[in-house]
Image (spheres, rainbow, N blue to C red):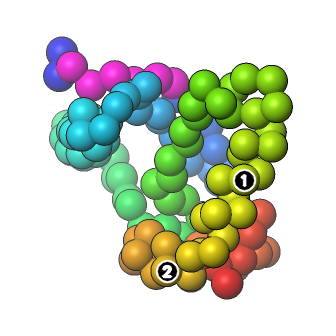
Amino acid sequence: YAGVQIGGINSEVAPGQWEFQIGPGVGVAAADDLWMARYLLQRICELFVVNVTFDPKPVRGWAGIGCHTNFSTRATRASGGFKVIEDHCRKLSQCHMEHMLVYGRENERRLVGNDEPQRFH
């Protein structure tokens, strides 16, 4: 009813941890859908008296959580797309720490390399 495009939903690694995907969306509309989806999630949880958290690591020793973005383009989906993805990763790696420092609060607690696939640094 809110017009937010929900692209999918799946369980995650930690107990009680679920993820939903917004989109596909383009530009500002995708960002608007994300904010509205988070608002709706909080309101629904309030109605059903359950908790929601956006803390990147709510339970020590469990896999962390965090908002992330999945994106694809025609080039990444076409033949030879894996090379395009590798090129994107190489370009992103040049400013990795700059990106990580503004990615979200306290992600260094989540990205420790023990419970998740990669370390923060």
Q: Residue at x 72, y 53 (%)?
A: 87
Quadrant position of the C terminus in the picture: bottom right
Dot 1 amino acid type: Asp
In the image, 109: left or right of 4? right
The x and y percentages for residue 26 are 34, 31
> Residue 30: which quarter of the image?
top left
Q: Residue at x 34, y 52 (%)?
A: 51
Dot 2 amino acid type: Glu
Q: Residue at x 66, y 53 (%)?
A: 88
Q: Nearer the viewer, residue 74 or 108?
A: 74
Does dot 2 land on a helix, a strand or a loop?
A: helix
> Residue 55: which quarter of the image?
bottom left
> Residue 27: which quarter of the image?
top left
Q: Is residue 27 above or below residue 86?
A: above
Range shown magenta: 3-8
Q: Residue at x 21, y 19 (%)?
A: 3
The x and y percentages for residue 57 are 53, 70
In the image, 95: left or right of 22? right
> Mark 1 packing: few (<14 Cα in 10 Å), some, or many (20+)?
few
- Residue 55 seen in the current view: yes
Does dot 1 land on a helix, a strand or a loop?
A: helix
- Residue 59 seen in the current view: no
> Mark 2 packing: few (<14 Cα in 10 Å), some, or many (20+)?
few
The x and y percentages for residue 107 are 51, 75
What label sits on residue 87 in the rendered view?
Answer: 1
What label sits on residue 98 in the rendered view?
Answer: 2
Count of numbered circles in the view: 2
What is the spatial separation of the Cα atoms under label 1 and label 2, in whole angstroms? Answer: 18 Å
Q: Is residue 97 above or below residue 99?
A: below
Quadrant position of the N terminus in the picture: top left
Q: Nearer the viewer, residue 65 or 49?
A: 65
Q: Nearer the viewer, mark 1 or mark 2?
A: 1
